[in-house]
Image (cartoon, rainbow, N blue to C red):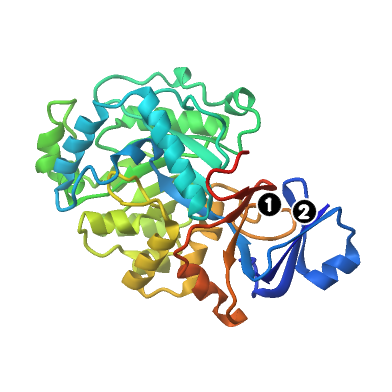
Amino acid sequence: MRFIRARILLTQKGPPIENGAVALKGGKIIAVGNYRDLAALYTADERMDLGESILMPGLINAHCHLDYTGMRNKIPSGKSFCEWLAQIITLKSTQTQESYAAAIEEGLNELLSSGVTSVFNIHATGEITPTFPIPRLRTWWFQEVIDIRSPVCMDNLKIPNFPKRYPGWLGGAGLSPHAPYTASESLYRGVKQYAEKYGLPVTTHLAETREELEMFQNGSGPLFDFLKNMGPPVRSQKTPLSTLLDLDLLPFGTILVHMNALDKTDWRLLQKRAQNYTIVHCPKTHAYFERKKFHFQRLRELGINICLGTDSLASNDSLNLFEEMRLFQRSHQTSEQETLNMVTLHPAKAIGLAGRLGVIAAGAHADFIAVSYTGPLKEAVTAVLNQTAPIGWTMVGGIVFHGEKSPR
């Protein structure tokens, strides 16, 4: 058994604990509490004192595209969504599997150095796992599927055997039909059946732009014109969200990314199904596209589980969730604690691991970060949100990393 002690323990399950400690066995937490109390109850084979620091759960990035890490600063902001899509297609045409693998590795290192211990990654390029060692982070690899140009054979994805094929992988695999304008109704239906059969999580981009809404409702607009030569035009006379919900194409628990462009019909549907889905908001990408204010207050009032993500470096300049939290809090005047919940407790719930991820509690995974801090206990959460320095100490599954280049 191991003890880890820090001046402040931020558990995300109760008030901060001064002179706190965690007892570990392997990669799981056995007990949490005051250091002296734990020391009286348990005998430790190893003790680690983190000194003047806050020990807290590692952050969970609920939406990321690591294969686009090499596109940082390649597309200036201020472009329309369709102009951005055109540049993405051009940039992807110049990439190789080797360059994608290097970009993913770079992105994983950046996440680790900015306090992320779990990531929900959308993978759009080739085989579900790239040609590099198993990630040190707890990674959910969502295979993106698109059938706007050619059909997708679900049986060729090999996702159900993922744990057996990659022993030691922390996290799992899932499916991501890209969006209703690039994935057909039949593909969404196939993904739902496949996911329900094998117990896989699903995520999809949905209601991201007004152009998407115009395309579905009116069969016109910039996105309609952009895509009409790539496949059958979409015109459902409904919204993207109502199209998927009315046809029952989204599995329970689907993680819906963006959800910016909603109309009255969408709000009525969400009111009835608020507990069925998670929504991920990406604040810096939202700002990059100069979009109208995200409907956070209204979505929160419905009781929807809301998380934060970074999206990709094709529409962001970093993969830093601390920056996302600060921008979100400035935009929506949320409490610091509520904002922190959106990168810990909420994404843990979204992936089906409430109580085992994003929290320091008995039975949870030993995924922690340490933030240097000498201030008062009552300002610990404030200090976390104001963190700007790289995270120098991280634990994932009971294994410690000192800085981004530590070997696993």
The amino acid at mark 1 is Ala
Percent position of residue 261, x then y = 24, 54
Q: What residue is shown at x 41% (from left), y 32% (from top)? A: 102
Q: How far apart are marks 1 and 2 (CA)?
A: 7 Å
Q: Is residue 340 above or below residue 219?
A: below
Q: What residue is shown at x 86% (from left), y 57% (from top)? A: 44
Q: Nearer the viewer, residue 135 or 408?
A: 408
According to the picture, the residue beneath numbered tag 2 turns out to be 24
**Disc 1 + disc 2, Cβ < 8 Å:** yes
Taking 361 as reference, is 179 left or right? left
* Image quadrant containing the C terminus: top right
Q: In this view, does 344 lie above or below 68?
A: below
Badge 2 element: strand
Residue 89, visible in the rendered structure: yes
N-terminal of the two: label 1 or label 2? 2
Q: Which of 251 and 400 is in front in this view?
A: 400
Badge 1 element: loop
Q: How crowded is mark 2: few (under 14 residues within 10 Å), some or many (20 or more)?
A: many
Q: Is residue 375 above or below residue 235?
A: below
Taking 30 as reference, is 94 left or right? left
Residue 307, visible in the rendered structure: no
Percent position of residue 319, x then y = 40, 51
Taking 278 as reference, is 92 left or right? left
Q: What residue is shown at x 27% (from left), y 44% (from top)? A: 240
According to the picture, the residue beneath numbered tag 1 turns out to be 366
